[in-house]
C-alpha cells in the first residue's frame, strides 16, 4: 500500500497525558498537512509543511500542540496535557510538489479519545 | 475562505443518478471548485475538480453553472459504496482546504 499511513489508528488516554501521532506521507510528496475532525463536522486545518519547513499554522493549534517533520518525510503531531476537548480524529494528508492543485491524499486518521 | 452551501443530506436509490448541488455565490475568478467525499471511518477522498468547464472522470461528473455561482456533482449510477459525506470546496491556491459540513448521501438498496 503506497497511500498515506497513520499510526496509531486509535488512542485512548487520560486527561493530562501526552500523546503523539505519526504520519507517513506518500513517497516523494513534498507537502504534508494535519487536520482535525470532530463528530459531525468536516475536517479543520491545523498545520502545513513543505518539506521540513512548517509554513502555516491554524489558530486551532494551541501551545499544547506541536508538529514536526524533521527530515521532510514522516511527521509527528504531539499533544501535551490532553484535555477532553482534544477528542477527535486527527487526519494527515500529503500532496506532491510543484503547482498546488488542491488534490490532497488523506490517510485513514488517528482517533483520539481523552477520558 | 469563500464559503459553499450544501444540503445537509440527500437520499438516492441504488443504480440511479445522483445530483449533489453546491452554491458558492461568493466565488472569485481564480477559485477552483473541488469535491471530496468521506466514507465512514475513512479519511476524505478526492473526487473531482474544475474551474469553468464541465469535467468528467471515472468517479463522477462536475457541472459548473455559467456564472460559476453553483455547481453539481453527478454520480451516474449510485452504488451502496457511494454512501458518504460529500464536500464541495472552493480552492484558491492556499495551503489548506476549508471543508464545511458537506452533504450526507444515503443510498437505498
Image (cartoon, coloured by chain):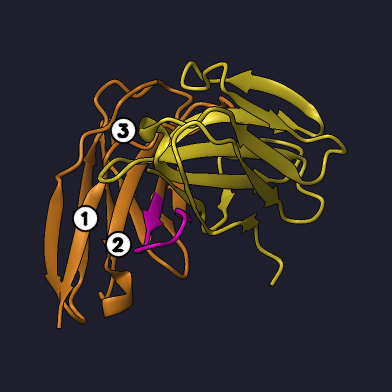
Between residues B17 and A65, which one lies in front from this camera angle? A65
Q: Quadrant of residue A114?
A: top left
Q: Earlier in the sequence, mark 3 or mark 1?
A: 3
Chain B appears in which tint? orange
Residue under pointer 2: B84
- Who's the residue at 38% across and 56% down the image? B37
Q: Report if residue B32 is visible in the image.
A: no
Say which mark, if any, is on residue B68.
Answer: 3
Between residues B91 and B70, which one lies in front from this camera angle? B91
The secondary element bearing badge 3 is classed as loop
Chain A appears in which tint? yellow
Which quarter of the rendering shows the C terminus of chain B?
Answer: bottom left
Placement of A10 over or under A73, stated as above or below = below
Check disc 1: other Cα within 10 Å, few if <14, some if 14-19, many if 20+. many
- Who's the residue at 36% across and 31% down the image? A85
Question: Disc 3 versus disc 1: distance between alpha carbons?
Answer: 23 Å
Which quarter of the rendering shows the N terminus of chain B?
Answer: top left
Check disc 3: other Cα within 10 Å, few if <14, some if 14-19, many if 20+. many
Say which mark, if any, is on residue B104.
Answer: 1
Residue A59: horizontal and vertical position, in percent? 48, 16
Q: Is residue A42 left or right of residue A104?
A: left
Residue B20: horizontal and vertical position, in percent? 22, 54
Amino acid at each position: 500500500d503506497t497511500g498515506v499511513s497513520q499510526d496509531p489508528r486509535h488512542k485512548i488516554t487520560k486527561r493530562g497525558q501526552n500523546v503523539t501521532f505519526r504520519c507517513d506521507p506518500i513517497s516523494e510528496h513534498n507537502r504534508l498537512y494535519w487536520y482535525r475532525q470532530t463528530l459531525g463536522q468536516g475536517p479543520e486545518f491545523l498545520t502545513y509543511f513543505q518539506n521540513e519547513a512548517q509554513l502555516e499554522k491554524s489558530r486551532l493549534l494551541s501551545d499544547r500542540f506541536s508538529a514536526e517533520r524533521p527530515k521532510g518525510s514522516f511527521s509527528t503531531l504531539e499533544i501535551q496535557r490532553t484535555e477532553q476537548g482534544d477528542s477527535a480524529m486527527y487526519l494527515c494528508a500529503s500532496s506532491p510538489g510543484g503547482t498546488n492543485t488542491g488534490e490532497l491524499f488523506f490517510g485513514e486518521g488517528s482517533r483520539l479519545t481523552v477520558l | 475562505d469563500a464559503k459553499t452551501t450544501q444540503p445537509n443530506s440527500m437520499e438516492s436509490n441504488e443504480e440511479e443518478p445522483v445530483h449533489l448541488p453546491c452554491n458558492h455565490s461568493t466565488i472569485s475568478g481564480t477559485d477552483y471548485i473541488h469535491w471530496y467525499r468521506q466514507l465512514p471511518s475513512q479519511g476524505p477522498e478526492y473526487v473531482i475538480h474544475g474551474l469553468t468547464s464541465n469535467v468528467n472522470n471515472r468517479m463522477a461528473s462536475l457541472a459548473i453553472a455559467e456564472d460559476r455561482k453553483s455547481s453539481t456533482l453527478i454520480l451516474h449510477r449510485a452504488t451502496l459504496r457511494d454512501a458518504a459525506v460529500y464536500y464541495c470546496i472552493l480552492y484558491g491556491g492556499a495551503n489548506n482546504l476549508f471543508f464545511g459540513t458537506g452533504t450526507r448521501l444515503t443510498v437505498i438498496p
